[in-house]
Amino acid sequence: MEQAESTASVEGQGTEATASLDAPYSTLESRAHQMFPTLNADEVERMRRFGTPQRWRAGEKLFSVGQVGRGMYMVLSGSVQIIRRDGLGREHLIIELGPGMFSAEVGTLSGRPSLVDGRAQTDSEGFVIAPDRLRALLVAEAELGERIMRALILRRVGLIESGSGPVLVGHGTEPLLLALQAFLRRNGHPHTVIDMDAERDCSCLSEFANAPATDFPLVICPDGRVLRAPDEGQLASCLGLLPEFDPAHVYDVVVVGAGPAGLATAVYAASEGLSVAVVDCRSPGGQAGASARIENYLGFPTGISGQALAGRAFVQALKFGAHIAIPLEVKALHCGADPIRLELVDGRMIPTHTVVIATGAQYRRPAIDALERFEGRGVYYWLRRWKPNCARTSPSCSSVAATRPGKRRCTLPRMPRKCICWCAARGWRPRCRAT
Ligand SMILES: Cc1cc2nc3c(=O)[nH]c(=O)nc-3n(C[C@H](O)[C@H](O)[C@H](O)COP(=O)(O)OP(=O)(O)OC[C@H]3O[C@@H](n4cnc5c(N)ncnc54)[C@H](O)[C@@H]3O)c2cc1C
């Protein structure tokens, strides 16, 4: 990503175009050519039939951070700047797209709000491919589709590494800040965290210096909106992560749960042309998303992290047009009539002909008084990415579920100063061991 970022200057307040030091250990350095490929004339021609011709004047905004864009923009002549911008007004030029290059990232597949700005640098022309046509292109043009898909994924990874998106401002290890951070990380959404205590002198935070403690954590969205101590649902809705459900549309299949089973169902059903929605109350990947390394998943002989597996499955489901809604919790199933209706906790109904319930298992939790009070603030479940800041300095507890015989060992990548570990598997009584 960093090599791909231009060092040319960008007009605008707070612009820092030399972003090349942001992520010095980026694994993407050698992949700029895959992230921003220049397609040849034949490939552009094959894409043209999926798009609508457009012209842009110098300085014209093609799409803006936080706004739903029209799809992928292919440049035929002229030049378009792609700029990332956060809610604090900081801008970074990512790349200048010339002829044969295209805008878009993973979110474009499902018409999600843009994570970057696109601005014509000169009078330019090209064509726009709407999200549904882009998905059709990826399926119809297999080899070209593979290259485009790889570019979209790498761009999302680059945005995550460079820390664009919403800015979370809070105090150290407060539970809600950690929860929002974990939510965005597990949903593969770029974000930045500013610790008010560590960066007290940061001038960009002066306007929040006197905010009451109850306002924290603050979330400054890229479009400038400020959320005060939001929950995950409010954050997701502000970022445009939740699709609207048309009450008149009856899905062929609605899947409850976006773990490996739910996402696999979505990929198979959507790839057969069925209309599919997936609803999950947490994040894609389910329990598997918390696994540091899965060795026994078919097709990955060298193993794969749960997060990577979930990310791939999630994008694959989007590619085939599944509507994925996270975080939304299903409260009830009304199957007395056709169509069946799924009731969400917010009261909305989703009509469908078929429901697949892939809600996984629930952990047996230790019977300890008032345990809920300490969850996320010393007691953790699903301990994949240990919180290094708090873990090294404060005593912490973790609960790890082993679901198979032989999987009774708990793997903690970075051990906290003190760890108590419960392992629960079939036939086991929870055990408690202090170290
Ligand atoms: C740390 C860890 C490591 C693991 N490592 C391995 C391994 O190496 N190999 C292996 O084979 N297995 C491993 N497992 C087990 C494996 O992850 C699970 O067997 C697998 O994830 C089950 O998939 P699933 O889709 O059935 O359910 P889950 O992964 O549990 O997904 C269910 C999803 O449903 C959602 N959901 C539940 N109720 C609702 C509702 N009412 N509304 C909306 N959404 C809802 C949940 O949020 C969740 O995302 C591991 C598990 C953990 C926790």
Image (tube, helix red, strand yellow):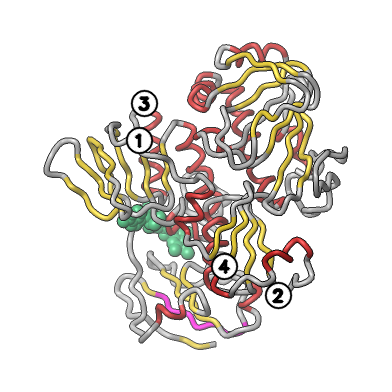
Q: Amino acid at mark 2?
A: Asp
Residue toward you, 224 or 278: 224
Could you tell me what secondary structure mostly forms the magenta stretch?
strand
Q: Amino acid at mark 3?
A: Gly
Q: Which label belongs to residue 177?
A: 4
- Write the residue at 45% across / 31% down: 320
Q: Judging from the image, what secondary structure is the residue with disc 2 in?
A: loop
Specify the quadrant that holds the N terminus.
top right
423 in relation to 163, above or below: below
First in sequence, mark 2 or 4: give its number.
4
- Say whether marks 1 and 4 touch (CB < 8 Å): no
Give the distance between the C-alpha atoms of the residues marked 2 and 3, in whole angstroms.
Answer: 52 Å
First in sequence, mark 2 or 3: give its number.
2
Q: Nearer the viewer, mark 1 or mark 4?
A: 4
Q: Judging from the image, what secondary structure is the residue with disc 3 in?
A: loop
Give the distance between the C-alpha atoms of the residues marked 1 and 4, in whole angstroms.
Answer: 33 Å
Q: Judging from the image, what secondary structure is the residue with disc 1 in?
A: strand
Q: Position of residue 185 (x, y in %)?
A: 57, 56
- Say whether marks 3 and 4 touch (CB < 8 Å): no
Give the distance between the C-alpha atoms of the residues marked 2 and 4, in whole angstroms.
Answer: 13 Å
Give the distance between the C-alpha atoms of the residues marked 1 and 2, in whole angstroms.
Answer: 45 Å
Q: Nearer the viewer, mark 3 or mark 4?
A: 4
**Where does label 3 land, which residue?**
273
Q: Position of residue 132 (x, y in %)?
A: 48, 25
> Which stretch appears magenta?
417-423
**Where does label 2 land, which residue?**
197
Looking at the rendering, which quadrant does residue 38 occupy?
top right
Q: Position of residue 124 (x, y in %)?
A: 75, 18
Q: Which label belongs to residue 276?
A: 1
Left or right relative to 226: residue 7: right
Residue 359 in sight: no
